[in-house]
Image: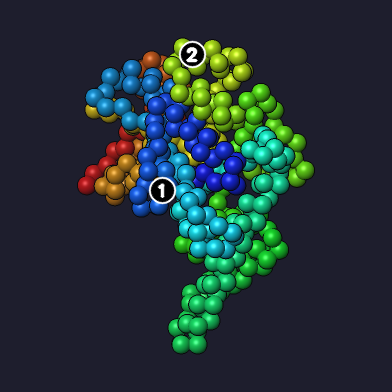
Amino acid sequence: MKLGIIGLPQAGKSTVFAALTGARGEKGGTDSFQKGARLATITVADDRIDFLADMYAPEKTTYAKIEYLLPSEVGRGASGSASEGEFWGQVRTCDALVQVVRNFEGPVGSPSTPDVDFSKLEQEMIFNDLMVVEKRMERIDLDQKRGKKPPPEEPPLLQSCRQLLEKGMPLRHSPELASDPMLKGFTFLSAKPRLVVVNNEDETEEMPAWAQRPEGMELIVVRGKLEMDIAEMSPEESEEFLEAYHITESALDRVISSSFRILNRICFFTVGSDEVKAWPIRSRTPALEAAGAVHSDIQQGFIRAEVVSFEDLKAQGSFKAAKKAGLVRLEGKEYTVEDGDIINFRFNV
């Protein structure tokens, strides 16, 4: 899972990125292939993994990971410029976007307007998507004149995209269109799931009023500068500041939780003396596909999935006790994996 952190200049993207990557001492490196972009791989803390590691005492414990990309804004120009295209190109391959909007006084005392800032960047994404659509439709017309026919489903889908985008509406307003497999390769920006992070001043805890709150989108409040500073403190110091500023959960944990939700992800676990591991997958994934996440050979030779929920295992105290209580189940290929399932895949290759 990779999410791109976007926002207008001075919104506090770098500050929020530093708050995320500093919370557990995980610093974001620089990706030389993306012209100064910074990519951080973050460990997803999970009490369930901790419990299972204590129970099985494995040689290795592997938590789920999530990546956050901070694109470079060096040379970023006006909308439609070459540098603007490079900026958006860095985040097009991300699974989702985290948009930081400013809710504090700017460096020259400009008023904070998170709703206006949100809309401005939204229109940039719509404009970029429209350019992609028009460029592809021009190419299709040229190919047809040369006798080369595109897939019959593609032109009407692109026409539907253009009609929506020309109205100034993001593609996510049409979920069926945004998720159509034929359009996956276009990596449309306005079709991506998005989390809005409102970056408040240190003393402001509340969500600001919105003239028009974004529909179907998750919003959370952080105090980026404050939480960046706290992330760099020792545990003893940070505990005092977290209490003083009424912060019950770090920005990192809140953003991770929201990232899982907007991407519709859950985790199942595999356990043993060699390794306890979390496997993030899309919600409603069948057991056969989950087996493939572990290894293609397991998917190919799938026989059954031996499943027990984490809560049942924890309540019983051991796998043996859970099995004796009839809480361990044998499931087939079509079983829908649930969050917290502990699975042992039976297979033969």
Viewer-side residue, 322 vs 43: 43
Q: Position of residue 255 (x, y in %)?
A: 53, 34
Q: Position of residue 20 (x, y in %)?
A: 48, 32
From the viewer's perspective, is 84 left or right of 203? Answer: left
Q: Position of residue 80 (x, y in %)?
A: 57, 63
State whether residue 339 appears in this view: no
From the viewer's perspective, is 261 left or right of 22? Answer: right
At label 1, the amino acid type is: Gly
Disc 2 from disc 1: Cα separation = 32 Å
Colouring scheme applied when the structure was drawn: rainbow
Q: Residue at x 72, y 39 (%)?
A: 111
Q: Position of residue 262 (x, y in %)?
A: 55, 42
- Element assignment for label 2: helix
List the residue tagged with mark 1.
36
List the residue tagged with mark 2.
237
Viewer-side residue, 319 vs 160: 160
From the viewer's perspective, is 155 left or right of 94? Answer: right
Question: Quarter holding the N terminus?
Answer: top left
The answer to whether 78 is drawn above or below residue 115 in the figure is below
Viewer-side residue, 233 vs 41: 233
